[in-house]
Amino acid sequence: MGAMMQRCRSRTASDVTGSIGMENSVLGALVSSNRGAYEFRILQAGTLPLRPDGSVAIGTEHRCTSVLIWPANEHASRFNTICVDPCFTDEGFHQTAAPILRQLGLGVSDLSYCFITHEHRDHWPTFPAEHSHTLRPLPASPNEAGFPGLSTLLCPGHSSRLGALRSRSPENHDVWIVGDAG
């Protein structure tokens, strides 16, 4: 995952073309034993133009789900956010991500770390051209970046290098964030 994690430089939405995969991100309230729960917001909901019968739904944009995570007892800021699969399309960014970021008092330049679930092009960091931004890759040990209780794990399946973020819930249950986990 090292090379994939280094790819946290933004691209324009027009650069992103690629395979159509099943998008079914697993999301939840992440919990860190040292800081409490992690908040999250879905910045861009995934959509897939491929129908179960193999036909393509014309007019449906291919997007992966992008999620913003930060410690629950803190205000989201440039120092404590992780953006999972920040692969924004122009439409997805302007319809949902930009308004949510504004609501949180953030701009694109305030996003700090990124976690890319796997190397498929539709998960590469991409921002609309007017919002080009470079994110820092989340270290293999999130604790090094100030995110105690989070870990990264390899979950081969959809991709041989599929990665996940993992934490524990207050009830001591595992919580995972995984892209294309369908």
Image (spheres, rainbow, N blue to C red):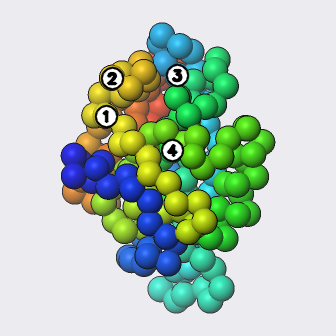
Tell me what residue is drawn at x 28 percent, y 34 percent.
140
Whichever of callouts 1 and 2 sits on the residue coming sooner in the sequence is: 1
Q: Is residue 22 visible?
A: no
Per the model, the C-alpha gap separating discs 1 and 3 is 18 Å
Q: Which residue is mark 2?
A: 144
Q: Is residue 42 left or right of residue 151?
A: right
Q: Is residue 134 left or right of residue 36?
A: left
Q: Secondary structure at mark 4?
A: strand
Per the model, the C-alpha gap separating discs 1 and 2 is 7 Å
Q: Residues within 10 Å of mark 2 (few under 14, many from 20)?
A: few
Q: Secondary structure at mark 2?
A: helix
The residue closer to the viewer here, 94 or 134, is: 134
Q: Which residue is mark 3?
A: 31
Q: Which residue is mark 4?
A: 83
Whichever of callouts 3 and 2 sits on the residue coming sooner in the sequence is: 3
Name the quadrant of the C terminus. bottom left
Q: Is residue 147 visible?
A: yes
Whichever of callouts 4 and 2 sits on the residue coming sooner in the sequence is: 4
